[in-house]
Image (cartoon, coloured by chain):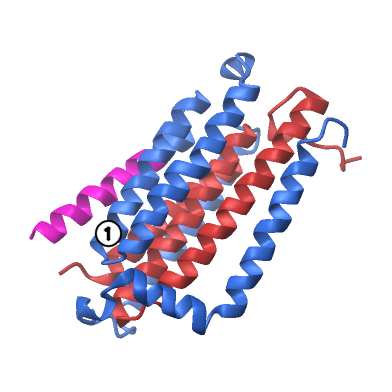
Amino acid sequence: MIPTSHYLFLGLALFTIGVIGVVTRRNVIVILMSIELMLNAVNINLVAFSRLVGSVEGHAFAIFIITDAAAEAALGLGIIIAFFRNRETLLGDEMDLLKW
Amino acid sequence: MLDQAVFYFFAALAVISAVLVVTRRNVVQSAIFLITALLATAGIFLQLHAEFLFIVQVILYAGGIMVLFVFVIMLINLDVSLHQVQFNRQWWLGLLLALVLGAQLTIAVAVGRSGLPLGEPAPASMLEPSTQLVGKVLFSEYMLPFEIASILLLVAMIGAVVMGKKKI
């Protein structure tokens, strides 16, 4: 039997890799993908605890998170396309319209 | 024994492909490795007796969201982005802080697992049949969040249409 803490370690490893991707990469599409990785890591934790206590409520929360991820991907990619049309770039550190 | 082999295989696959997602230069390769990571997560869901989530993960994540990503990459793929610097100027600081965060979480789990009652898991039969139980929970206790999620999807749909217009 695999101890629940191993699932937690897997989840935090994936989450940390996602954070590294968000804070170090310049390409906005890769940043969005890293956010998807982080959401997935949270899902692993929820399902692992669900298995531990023998209740499906964690699954319901995981479904809500997947819904959020779908909404976020649709909106984020829409923003990326709109931004690319206006500025001809995909680099996150060149998105500085609010900086003065 | 088989259980453990399946878990560690999928865990290693997920971590390796996650690292490749973050480090690859080509965005298309990143997307392919993200699909691998998501499918490995789906395998872990299956191993945790979450059959419904497994199929949702495969259809919605690997099938829906990733198609969206690849479609956008196809629309705006720039050959110049392959020759640009891939990491921003503060990457070393960000990497350091992210690793500190990871170390903190690791210590928290490693220290806290002796205090938490992380004993033997409940019998797997309590999660059977997965789809039926999830449906029951979603349509009784979490009815209001479920409806709010549908409004969220409507808002996201309208937002995506507005963002896709020629002139914002």
- Residue that badge 1 annotates: B46
**Looking at the image, which residue sits at the far left?**
B1
Q: Is residue B11 magenta?
A: yes
Q: Image check: B26 left or right of B87? A: left
Q: Which residues are magenta?
A: B1-18
Q: Quick one: B50 or A93, which is closer to the camera? A: B50
Q: Quick one: B85 or A63, which is closer to the camera? A: A63
Q: Image check: A54 left or right of A35? A: left
Number of labels in the image equals: 1
Q: Secondary structure at mark 1?
A: helix
Give the colour of chain A.
Answer: red
Vertical arrangement, residue B94 with respect to residue B31, above or below: below
Disc 1 residue type (three-letter)? Leu
Q: Image check: B40 left or right of B70? A: left
Q: Quick one: B136 or B101, which is closer to the camera? A: B136
Vertical arrangement, residue A47 with respect to residue A22, above or below: below
Residue drawn at (77%, 33%), measured in percent from left and top?
A: A83
Give the colour of chain B.
Answer: blue
Residue B19 rendering spot, x and y as whole percentages = 40, 39
Residue drawn at (60%, 14%), measured in percent from left and top?
A: B79
Residue A27 rendering spot, x and y as whole percentages = 62, 32
Residue drawn at (37%, 68%), measured in percent from left and top?
A: A47
Q: Is residue A36 magenta?
A: no
